[in-house]
């Protein structure tokens, strides 16, 4: 029987290279533990086979740590929520198989979650004000934990709102109609903006993932120094492949003339390139906002951690009287708290799935 008083959801995320587990009680986060995989840095990108092996290694300690951190025990959990896709099949398989085993052993429902919906619902992760702390330990486990206090703090978007969802594999503008209803209004026709950051970083000789490093150097540079082409699509969709290629030629041409061009101008290159990507992202958000007359604008996904994007969204919002929503830094990149909160809303609607659910490498919103 469903316990409607206290609802505990255990969420598992393993779609790419982060193994994460979170526990949410009545929509409030009790714990969120993530093991990052540093092994991919040396290869300049995620190696799927290595990622799934590391998930296999990490999943038990991560789930164990999340349960301990939450001061919970398995008998209290009402349902298991797990990322079904989109993502790397082998990585998804580890989390999904583990979630199925838990669901079967505990005789509780299994809830499948679309990773991109999870990114958006990160805006609804309930927190208790003033009680959050984050610990990074030497074994790469990052933990977020809350001690429950009566009042919650964060301001959440109301419906409908627009969400610019920007990650390593996706770039979308989504109309969010309710916690569980979404309409895709625009998306990239080729690469994702996260790839545009990571590829440029690789060209500059920076390790993977390069997005956060471009962000770091951009803070020190002149964003008006270099110019890049702005794609001209007829709709509000995005295209990043041309920008990526023009960046490659730009670097090659300058390095031919001056072999020290990158190290002498790294900050300005990063600042100019990042500003260009942000300008392009927000140009289409503005167009969609005008077309839909929706002025509640959120961002989500790994690239929403970018400090330039966060600042520029607020500036544009001031200009156009938008209400803007920027996720807490730790809920931008992949985490299980966003999967658990999505699971919570699906639990309320009794949206469960069978033990025969298979991973979906591609899974539209
Ligand atoms: O959502 P996410 O953690 O994983 C996927 O679902 O793909 O997003 C990862 C992407 C990577 O491309 C990474 O470089 C980018 O998010 N990213 C950033 C920043 N932090 C993460 N890009 C720009 N600036 C950042 N601060
Ligand atoms: Zn993601």
Image: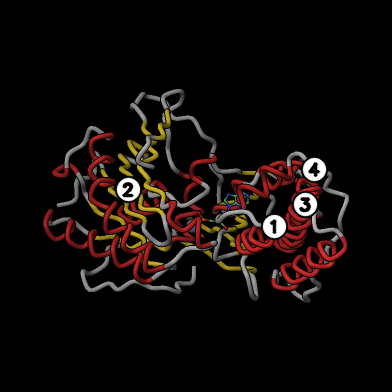
Q: Secondary structure at mark 3?
A: helix
The tag earlier along the polypeptide, 3 or 2, is 2
Which residue is depicted at the point 81% across and 73% down?
Answer: 232
The tag earlier along the polypeptide, 4 or 3, is 4
Q: Quadrant of residue 170?
A: bottom right
Which residue is depicted at the point 45% across and 72% down?
Answer: 363
* Side of 330 relative to 113 (left or right): right
Cα distance, mark 1 to mark 2? 34 Å
The tag earlier along the polypeptide, 1 or 3, is 1
Q: Is residue 69 above or below residue 210?
A: above
Q: Residue 192: x percent and y percent? A: 61, 66
State which mark lies toward you, 4 or 3.
Answer: 4
Q: Secondary structure at mark 2?
A: strand
Instruction: Tell me the crowding category of disc 1: few under 14, some 14 to 19, or many 20 or more residues within 10 angstroms, Cα based.
Output: some
Q: Residue 190: x percent and y percent? A: 64, 75
**Is label 2 within 8 A of ligand 2 (CB to nearest ligand atom)?**
no
Cα distance, mark 4 to mark 3? 11 Å
State which mark lies toward you, 4 or 1.
Answer: 1
Cα distance, mark 1 to mark 3? 17 Å
Query: Badge 3 is on which residue?
Result: 275
* Side of 132 relative to 279 (left or right): left
Query: Badge 1 is on which residue?
Result: 204
Q: Quadrant of residue 107?
A: bottom left
Cα distance, mark 4 to mark 1? 15 Å
Q: Residue 187: x percent and y percent? A: 63, 69
Query: Badge 4 is on which residue?
Result: 221
Cα distance, mark 3 to mark 2? 34 Å
Query: Badge 2 is on which residue?
Result: 21
Q: Secondary structure at mark 1?
A: loop
């Amino acid at each position: 029987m469903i316990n409607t008083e206290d609802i505990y959801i255990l969420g598992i995320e393993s779609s790419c290279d982060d193994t994460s587990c979170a526990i949410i009680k009545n929509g409030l986060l009790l714990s969120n533990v993530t093991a990052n995989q540093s092994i991919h840095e040396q290869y300049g990108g995620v190696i799927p086979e290595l990622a799934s092996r590391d998930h296999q290694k990490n999943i038990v300690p991560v789930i164990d740590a999340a349960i301990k951190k939450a001061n919970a025990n398995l008998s209290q959990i009402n349902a298991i929520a797990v990322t079904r896709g989109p993502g790397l099949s082998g990585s998804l398989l580890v989390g999904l198989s583990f979630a199925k085993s838990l669901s079967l052993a505990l005789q509780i429902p299994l809830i499948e979650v679309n990773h991109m919906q999870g990114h958006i619902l990160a805006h609804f992760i309930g927190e208790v004000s003033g009680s959050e702390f984050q610990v990074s330990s030497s074994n790469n486990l990052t933990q977020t934990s809350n001690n429950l206090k009566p009042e919650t703090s964060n301001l959440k978007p109301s419906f409908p709102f627009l969400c610019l969802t920007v990650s390593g594999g996706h770039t979308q503008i989504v109309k969010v109609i309710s916690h569980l209803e979404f309409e895709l209004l625009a998306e990239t026709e080729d690469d994702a903006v996260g790839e545009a950051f990571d590829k440029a970083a690789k060209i500059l000789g920076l390790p993977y993932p390069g997005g956060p490093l471009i962000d770091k150097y951009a803070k020190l540079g002149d964003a008006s120094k270099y110019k890049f082409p702005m794609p001209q699509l007829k709709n509000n969709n995005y295209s990043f492949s041309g920008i990526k290629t023009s960046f490659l030629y730009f670097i090659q041409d300058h390095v031919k003339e001056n072999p020290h061009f990158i190290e002498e101008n790294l900050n300005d290159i990063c600042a100019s390139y990042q500003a260009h990507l942000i300008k392009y992202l927000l140009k289409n958000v503005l167009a969609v906002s005008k077309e839909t007359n929706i002025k509640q604008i959120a961002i989500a996904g790994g690239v929403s951690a970018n400090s330039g994007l966060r600042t520029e969204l607020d500036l544009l919002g001031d200009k156009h009287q938008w209400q803007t929503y920027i996720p807490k830094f730790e809920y931008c990149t992949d985490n299980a708290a966003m999967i658990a909160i999505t699971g919570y809303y699906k639990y309320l609607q009794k949206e469960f799935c069978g033990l025969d659910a298979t991973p979906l490498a591609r899974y539209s919103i």
